[in-house]
Image (spheres, rainbow, N blue to C red):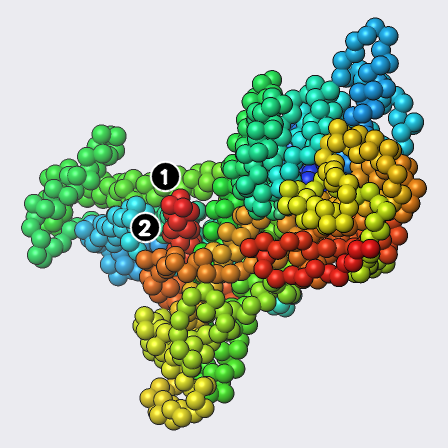
Amino acid sequence: MDLYQRHLLTEGIRVIEKTAPSDKFKAPYQNLKFEDAVLKRTDLAELRYQTAPIFNHFKYLINLLSGLMCFVFLILGATSISQLLVNENNSQINFFWALLLFIVPNFLSLLLWFFLYFKSKVVNFTWVASFSLSLISLLDKLQHKITTQHLYYPALFQYYFDHRFGSYLGRSQFSFMSHFWWCSYLLGATFSLLLVLATHQVDFIWQTTILNEDAFLWLTQLLTYLPELLNISVPSVKEVAYASINAVNSVDMAQYNRVNWSNLLIFSLVIYALMPRLILTFIFYRRIKYKQKNFKPDFTLPYYLQLKNIIHPIMNARFIKDADRQISENTNKRIPAADFNHNMSMPLDAFPIAIELTQQAYQDALKIVNAHYSVKLLNIIDRESEEKVLSALASSHLSGLIVFVDIARLPDRGWLTLIKKCSDKISGEMYLVILGQETVDKNPRLFARLQNWIEIAVKANISEKNMTYIIGEQHEDNPKGTHEGTEYE
Amino acid sequence: MNKHLLSVAVVGHANTGKTSLIRTLLRDASFGDIADKAGTTRHVEGAEIRIDDNHNLVIYDTPGLEDSIHLLSLLDSDFAKLSSAGYEDGIDRLLAFIQREHEFPELDQEIKVLKALLSNDLIFYVIDVREPILGKYRDELKILSYAAKPIIPVLNFIEAGEANISVWQAQLARLNLHAFVSFDSVVFRFSDEMKIYQKMQSLLADYDLQLEALIQQRQLQWLQREKAAQQLIASLLVEVAACRFKAVNNEESIQQVSEQLQANVRLLESQTLTQLLTLYQFKQHDIDLYELPIQEGQWKLDLFSADNLQEFGIKATSNFVKGAGVGVAVDLVAAGMTLGAAAVVGGVAGVLWGVKQRYYDELQAKLKGHRYLCADDITLQVLWKRQLHLLSVLQQRGHASVNKMSIDGSALNETGLPKAWAKWLKSARQHPQWASLNESDQPLFTNKKSALIKEITEHLIQIVKLK
Ligand SMILES: Nc1nc2c(ncn2[C@@H]2O[C@H](COP(=O)(O)OP(=O)(O)OP(=O)(O)O)[C@@H](O)[C@H]2O)c(=O)[nH]1
Ligand SMILES: [Mg+2]
């Protein structure tokens, strides 16, 4: 399968998958360039979608149509000679009429084609397309006696038709077809002319009623210029003039004349009509092949970008490097809806410390402490303050420990280590006061955080009844909120 | 292994958003676990990013540091004294500590981080800027400095912690860390991501070319993706505008057909929605997980509800709205020609349903024969604004977001409709064959349709440029 076909299939699969490229066609794409990776995926996907037979069928239909038309035109060309130029009861050929019949329309249609080709935007080809579409559909119906159609037949057909006759290939395709058909028409005409001239004896004359003689002479001279250069014997000026009068010359002369005239006619037909068409047909055949070779899906389409996400994700691979050795003890071991003590009473025989309180929370804590305790409230924020607190604890005679924390901080293992260090220094119970700015009921994030605090406090052997949550001094931005009932001994 | 260009370890205190940062950089919401508590990540997990055929970048997620004070005190006491020669540099200290790792089971997670520090080329130190500068963070930075690796501090949570940035900046400068980047894994800004790579580039001169390639690649990808998204929106507009259904001129039939039309428009919108989501690499399960206001592929807020009109700043009066939200009924003769007066006719249809046949007979007398129903101007406006809004939300959504995607359209109210709006609609409505759902025998040449879609896309690109 050549590249063009694979690209076409890629597009066909896009038509089928429409909006969402499937991620089922897995292959090691990482080491391929995107375009190659897409082709590889196409090969895989094709196994499932089976678009190639459909496209081949469409191609066959179009070729069939083109071939049929070609045949029709061939016949048309052949019959037009016998019908219009020479027939049984007429042994004279009006050269003028012959020209008009074959060369002039050909020339005009070439002009028209030229105009359309370069100004294709001006004209709407829809009717041509509609016409060919209905012909193709008709052919298809005749071909397909039973309609066992591919699920995406219509969509694929529409795509293929647009591909062949739309903006990318359309102009070349239409050009090729029209030249090709003209070729067959002219070929038919030439052959049948040869046949007629080989089997009939005809005289060449020219007749006109309204045109003047000079014009015809000039025209014939123009036509004879080239064959004369090529040393083909064609009617001379004198003979042309004679032909109009239809004067009968000697037999030899007449035969010589006839040959000259038929030379001219055949030459004109071949060189001025058939040749250009053949050349153009060839050119557009090459052009179609060239464009097909260069055909590439538009990889900036949303579909292909989606596909890129699938076959070339940003992350190539992921791997665990240093796995957790401990069978994660803390996963799923949620302490079931532990609650703090809303009415905790704090013993006076306890040492209050603060851990990582912000200025504001520290003030809140200080208010509570200053009201009931004589100890200076130390805030642990780093190693130095930690050591200070630990030595103060060691030298203190108080048995309990009250820890003030801010709900905004994250409870972590560091905190746990610290609390354990502290608890080694005291003999009594530990209390935890969590300070906050608002009630947790309406704020799920805060609620979860409070739960984390309670969990970790339990790990630090602080009993649930010794924990409380206090909403601190209100600040302007937080007007409502009450002190939860906390009593002091 | 030689394909590995360079490796980066993402370290930081617990819950600072290390995993979130990586998810956002990878555009992959399935990487690792994210939770708002300490100790979520337990393994060191690597992700490989492809730069080109020969180079990869590997990013390692690490467990959060939680007990740096303890760790540093060990490093500074036991392991500083260890040396018999009297001098040991930081790396030796770390190595000596790692050798005795079994003695410190409680620092298991921290040891993983130390290993990662020593084995990677570059360190991202993630900071939650909302936090005050506490001793534990300073100790973490000190431990990092022992590894003697280039460090890029990443200030995370900048959306919420903006006020704190300068404080952190000053602190970092004191530690000679001048090249920080700011980031937010939830409120994503593409320029911030680029800055991360640019900082890497400036710190790692050896990898300049490859990192430049990575930056280029990302930028191209971002632009292409944006353009593709705009194209999707443009083609949705064209498809919906081109969509029409034929109804017999009676209430029952119009009702039925208008339902068909609505279902169709919804279907098209939800298809575009899915496409936009996958384009920006949000997966279907991400949507469910993150409670986008979407159900079964549809926006929860119904396109045809009156609330929605208000939401998007479109004013219209009661009955009129109902009709308008349903579709425009047009005379067969006028179909495709005179839809300029769309809303008016749509309003007429609204009266038909709203006031229960009051004007029905009169109207029936006037409008004989069949009529076409097509999506009206207001529906299309809402549709248009919704997609634009969705796009802007998607572009600013980090892959670590866990919040609902809000579809507050008020921001879009000011942005009026494009000048060529009416022209676009007219053009689309005159080509019912452009709607993939309309069955038509006409050959579908996509070039005219593509041209219109391109025009609309260009317009969208212009809007973005102006912003
Ligand atoms: N608003 C906002 N939230 C963020 C950002 N980064 C992370 N988060 C949130 O912060 C919490 C912690 O994020 P993680 O990514 O799990 O943090 P981590 O550093 O990996 O945590 P560990 O693995 O436990 O060390 C999650 O709830 C995230 O949603 C951010 O930039 N902005
Ligand atoms: Mg993590």
Residue closest to the eye, B309 or A390: A390
Residue at (92% x, 27% y) in the render: B103
> Closer to the observer: label 2 or label 1?
2
Direction from residue A451 to residue A425 in the image, left or right: right
Q: Does the residue labelled 2 lie within 8 Å of ligand 1?
A: no
- Identify the secondary structure beneath mark 1: helix
| Other-residue count near label 2 (Cα within 10 Å), few / some / many at <14 / 14–19 / ≥20 | some
Quadrant location of the N terminus of chain B in the rendered image: top right
Q: Which of marks 2 and 1 is nearer the N terminus?
A: 2
- Residue A175: x and y in percent read 37, 48
Direction from residue A252 to residue A41 in the image, left or right: right
Q: Which residue position holds label 2?
A: A120
Q: Which residue position holds label 1?
A: A279
**Amino acid type of the residue tagged 1 in the rendering:** Ile
- Identify the secondary structure beneath mark 2: loop
Give the image quarter of residue B342.
Answer: bottom left
Residue at (66% x, 45% y) in the render: A363
| Badge 2 and badge 1 both on one subunit | yes
Please tell me whether residue A43 is drawn above or below residue B70 in the rendered image: below
